[in-house]
Image (cartoon, rainbow, N blue to C red):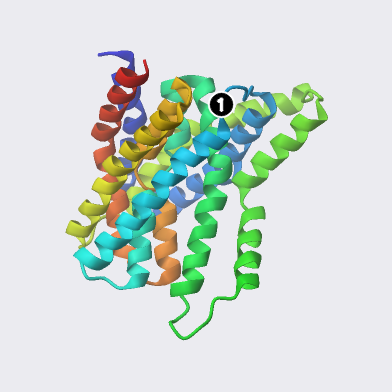
């Protein structure tokens, strides 16, 4: 077994263990929520804080990275919307759920430990630059669409309400707080006190395994119930169309090899829980979002291996 294959299997084995813990009743659903909250609200923000403070971002080409990645997001989102509305006859609100499910990669719970395991700290530095804008951009797009389609066709879009809702959600998000706090500390140029550094490092080191285990528990909670065909179609868009588009864009823009590899693998990740939460907000497409997330994650053990093979062949 090659080290790459072993790392992929290790990452998804942790997800599978979380799923089995929920399936067998060894851990109660409330335990899964608590573990997820710890991963998202404590461990992962501290990992991002640590990365912002310590990392060297020279040569990462953030504008080209963001342009390549989010151009692919926009195209894939549009394709998911059209597949949901035109091919499967769902309404515009369900189309938004289909679009976000096709384009919203699980770059935190699954992506962070996966990229760390495959590409190490240098790869995670690239991913951190993506995470720093991924959440705000996807959140803003979701809020705008929610204002347009989620409040009833008779209501007008209020730009001020959109901005207020976006800023409120953005600046109370623990991941954004971790990134901003790390950047603020970095600007001071001061080293972290030894005790603080030890605490941050210890908790940050738990982010990967805890996040993966929590991901598995979440999948067990949501499960699969109907909407199999549209969920499969959206999973194909997420796992194949989006990374293929990123591959084309990073090649056209001439991004560095490591930056290109991380961007493509991040695009190849399955959808995360945010697509389901958006469906809950719209009160439509919940089963579609949860099924797509579950099917895509189950398939990702094979599809991510495929894309890792592609990026290593193309970029070395």
- Report whether residue 43 is seen: yes
Residue 260 placed where, x, y %?
Answer: 43, 27
Judge left or right: residue 84 versus residue 75. Answer: left
Residue 39 placed where, x, y %?
Answer: 53, 41
Q: Nearer the viewer, residue 255 or 20?
A: 255
Judge left or right: residue 202 versus residue 117. Answer: right
Q: Nearer the viewer, residue 114 or 31?
A: 114
Q: Residue furthest front?
A: 252
Element on which disc 1 rests? loop
- Report whether residue 289 is seen: no
- Quadrant for the N terminus, please: top left
Q: Residue furthest left?
A: 229
Judge left or right: residue 294 versus residue 129. Answer: left
Can you identify the residue that label 1 sits on? 60
Q: Residues within 10 Å of mark 1 (few under 14, many from 20)?
A: many
Judge left or right: residue 247 versus residue 281. Answer: left
Residue 152 placed where, x, y %?
Answer: 44, 81
Q: Residue at x 23, y 61 (%)?
A: 225
- Vertical order, 71 against 305 (above or below): below
Q: Residue at x 37, y 47 (%)?
A: 271
Residue 295 placed where, x, y %?
Answer: 25, 48
- Quadrant for the C terminus, please: top left
Q: Residue furthest bottom?
A: 154
- Vertical order, 23 against 194 (above or below): below
Q: How many marks?
A: 1
Q: Residue at x 30, y 73 (%)?
A: 91
Q: Residue at x 33, y 47 (%)?
A: 22
Q: Nearer the viewer, residue 151 or 277?
A: 151
């Amino acid at each position: 077994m090659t080290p790459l294959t072993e790392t992929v299997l290790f990452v998804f084995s942790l997800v599978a263990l979380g799923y089995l813990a929920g399936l067998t009743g060894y851990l109660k659903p409330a335990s899964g929520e608590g573990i997820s909250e710890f991963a998202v609200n404590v461990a992962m923000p501290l990992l991002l804080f640590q990365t912002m403070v310590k990392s060297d971002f020279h040569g990462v080409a953030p504008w080209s990275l963001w342009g390549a990645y989010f151009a692919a997001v926009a195209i894939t989102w549009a394709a998911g919307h059209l597949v949901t509305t035109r091919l499967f006859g769902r309404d515009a609100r369900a189309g938004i759920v289909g679009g976000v499910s096709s384009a919203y990669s699980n770059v935190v719970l699954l992506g962070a430990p996966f990229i760390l395991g495959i590409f190490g700290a240098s790869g995670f530095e690239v991913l951190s630059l993506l995470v720093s804008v991924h959440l705000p951009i996807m959140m803003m797009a979701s809020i705008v669409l929610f204002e347009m389609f989620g409040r009833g066709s008779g209501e007008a879009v209020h730009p001020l309400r959109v901005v207020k809702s976006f800023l409120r959600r953005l600046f109370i998000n623990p991941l954004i707080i971790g990134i901003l706090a790390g950047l603020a500390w970095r600007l001071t140029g001061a080293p972290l006190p030894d005790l603080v550094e030890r605490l941050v490092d210890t908790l940050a080191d738990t982010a990967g395994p805890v996040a993966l285990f929590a991901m598995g528990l979440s999948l067990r909670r949501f499960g699969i119930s109907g909407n199999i065909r549209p969920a499969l179609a959206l999973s194909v868009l997420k796992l194949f169309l989006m990374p293929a588009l990123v591959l084309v864009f990073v090649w056209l823009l001439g991004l560095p090899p490591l930056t290109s590899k991380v961007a493509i693998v991040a695009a190849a990740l399955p959808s995360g829980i945010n697509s389901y939460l958006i469906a809950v907000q719209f009160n439509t497409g919940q089963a579609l979002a949860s099924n797509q997330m579950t099917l895509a994650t189950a398939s990702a053990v094979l599809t991510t291996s495929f894309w890792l093979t592609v990026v290593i062949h193309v970029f070395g």
